[in-house]
Amino acid sequence: MKKFAVGIDIGGTYTKLGLVDKDGNCPVQSKLPTKGHSDIEEYLKNVKIEVDKLTNQIDDCEIVGIGIGVPNGNFYKGTIEHAANLEWKGVVPLIEKLKPIFPGIPAILTNDANASAYGEAIFGSAKGVKEFITITLGTGLGSGIVVNNKLVYGNNGFAGELGHTRAVDNGRECGCGKKGCLETYCSSTGLKRTLLEMLAIKKAPSKFRDLGINDFHGEEITEEALNGDEVAKAAFEKTGFILGRSLADFVAFSEPEVIYLAGGLVSSGELLFEPTRRSFEEHLMNSYKGKVKIMPSGLMDMNAAILGAAALIWNEYE
Amino acid sequence: MKKFAVGIDIGGTYTKLGLVDKDGNCPVQSKLPTKGHSDIEEYLKNVKIEVDKLTNQIDDCEIVGIGIGVPNGNFYKGTIEHAANLEWKGVVPLIEKLKPIFPGIPAILTNDANASAYGEAIFGSAKGVKEFITITLGTGLGSGIVVNNKLVYGNNGFAGELGHTRAVDNGRECGCGKKGCLETYCSSTGLKRTLLEMLAIKKAPSKFRDLGINDFHGEEITEEALNGDEVAKAAFEKTGFILGRSLADFVAFSEPEVIYLAGGLVSSGELLFEPTRRSFEEHLMNSYKGKVKIMPSGLMDMNAAILGAAALIWNEYE
C-alpha cells in the first residue's frame, strides 16, 4: 500500500486538494469551486468525489488522514468561525460534518496561514529552523508563527492575525472594521490602493492613469515598475517601507531566525524585497540588526497550504 | 535539610535576592547596590557574602541552585548583553564568572521580564494559564510572553522586547535609538513625559505647573489625578489609550488568555486600568473582543523577578 494524506486548501473561490506522501511529494492534485457551494453538505459530497478521483489514480492507495487549511479555521474545535470570505456564515463544525462522509479517517483542520507555515517547516525552506514567521501576501495578509518548532495557536486557536495589526495610525479602512491594518497596505489589494495613492501624489506619467483600480493587476504593476514607471516604483517602495517596519516589530515579539514571505506579491522579487529589507533593518532594535533574515518561501511553485495541511496529518501519524 | 533556590533580581540601582522554597515562600531577603560595582568580580564576591548571610539565617539550609533575572540576560548563553542600564558594558559571561564563586551549584539566568513572567506562572495569578503575557510598567516597559506554558525565548534569547515596538508613528525619542517605542509612553517615565505634554496642551490649573519633570513622581501623579487634577487625569487617559491599543496588537500575535500588568505604575489602579481596557476592546479585532482579560499581577507585593528566577531552578530541579 502507498500511504498518502489528503491535503485540502479551502479558499474563497476555489478549494484545492492533493495527495501528499510523507516526503512531501504530491503526485495528484485537483480543485473544485468553493464559491456557489452555500450548502456545506453538498460541498463536502463534492469534495469526497474529488478525493475518490485522486485515490483512483494511484494503485494501492491508502489514505491515512485528511488535513485542511481554511480561513478562520479553529484547530482546537475543528470549526470555521465567522470567515469573511466564505459563504458559510457563523460557526461551521466542518470536522464533525466531514466524519460521516469519510468514516474512520482522522481529519484535522487549521487556519490556512498556519497550514502554510507548517508546510514551510516540514517540506519547505524552514526545515531545521526552530523560530520563524511566514507572511503570505495574497488578496489579504496571512501569517503563521512558529516558536520552538511549534505553531503558535493561541488560547482559542486564533493566534497569528498579523494582517490586522496596526501598520499606520488612523490608516486605511480594513474589511475587519479596524483602521490602518497591515493587510490594507501589504497584500495585492494593498499594493493597488497604494498605487492609487501614488497616482494622486505624483505627477509622473503612468499607464495606470488610464485604468480603474478594478483593472489593476499585480503582475502588471510589477512589469511597469520594472519598465521604469515612477508611480509603480513608488508604490513598491511604500509597500516595502510599511512591511519592513511592521516585520521589525514582529521580531520584538518572538525573535525569529527567518521571516518567510509567500503569496502572489512575492513574485515581484527585489521590487518588494529590497525596500522591505531596507526598512526592516532601519526599524529593528540594535540588538536584532543583521540577525534576522527575510526570505522568499521555499514552496513558491507548490501549494504550501495543501502540503502543510497534509503535514499536520503526517505529524500525528508518526 | 530545607531546600531553597536563590533568586536574584539584578536591577540598575539595586540587586535584590532571596531564598525561595519550592512553594514560592521567601522567608529571607536581602539587597546590595548594583550601581558603583563596575568591577564584576568584586560585585559577585559581594553577592556571595549576601547569599551566605541569608543561608546562615536558616537552619539546615541546602541551596539547590541560583536563578538570576537581569536586563538583557541571555538565557541560552548565560550572558548579559549590551545592557543600557548596567555598568558592565558589552557581553558579560555572568554564569561563567559565577561558577568558581559558587562551585557545584547550578546557575541559570534570564531576562528580568521573562523571570517575572515565570514567577507569575509558577507562584502568581497565572497558575494554570497556558497562554499569557506579562507587561512590567516600571522605569521602562518589560515583557514576558508565555505560549503553551513555555516562555518565548526567541532565536538568540532576546524575544519579548515589546517595550520597543512602535506605539506611535514618528513618536517620542527612545533610549534604544528608535522613535515612538511603547515604553516612551507606557512606563513611569512615559507617564511623566505625557504629563508634560498635557501641561502644554491643556489650560487647567495643576500642581505640576510649579515642578520640573525631574520632580514628578508616579505616586504624586496618581494622587493628584484622584484629587481631580484635570491634567494628571488626561495623562492617565492617554497612557491607557496607547497601552490598550498596543496590547490589542499583541493579541493578534499570540492570542493570550490574560495580559498581566505589573510594576510601579499598576498601583495607580483604575486610573490606568479603566482607559487601558476601554482602548483595548476598541482596538481588538472582532474575533478577540471580550475574550482576553487584562489583570494586575498576582505578585504585586512580592518581588516577581526573585520568585521567577528561583522558579527557573525549581523547574529544572524537579
Image (cartoon, coloured by chain):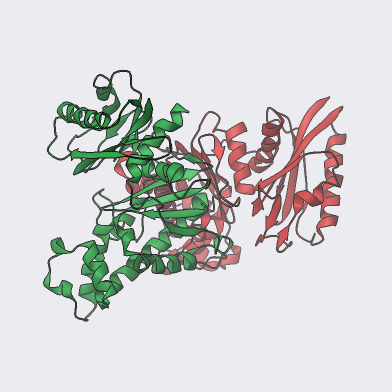
Chain colours: A red, B green
> Residue, x 33% and y 25% (percent of image)?
B60
Q: How many labels does the image show?
A: 0
Q: Quadrant location of residue B207?
A: bottom left
Q: Quadrant location of residue B216?
A: bottom left
Closer-to-camera residue (B40/A299): B40
Q: Is residue A235 something one can see in this rendering?
A: no
Q: Is residue A181 something one can see in this rendering?
A: yes
> Residue, x 75% and y 54% (percent of image)?
A93
In the image: residue B179, left or right of residue A20: left
Closer-to-camera residue (A149/B314): B314
In the image: residue B241, left or right of residue A144: left
Residue A203: where, in percent of width, then height? 39, 67
Residue A63: where, in percent of width, then height? 81, 34
In the image: residue A87, left or right of residue A212: right
In the image: residue B161, left or right of residue A8: left
* In the image, residue A112 above or below residue B70: below
* Rendered-image quadrant of the C terminus of chain A: top right
Residue A259: where, in percent of width, then height? 48, 41
| Residue ranking furthest to the front | B59
Residue B194: where, in percent of width, then height? 26, 66
* In the image, residue A275 above or below residue A5: below
Q: Quadrant location of residue A274?
A: top left
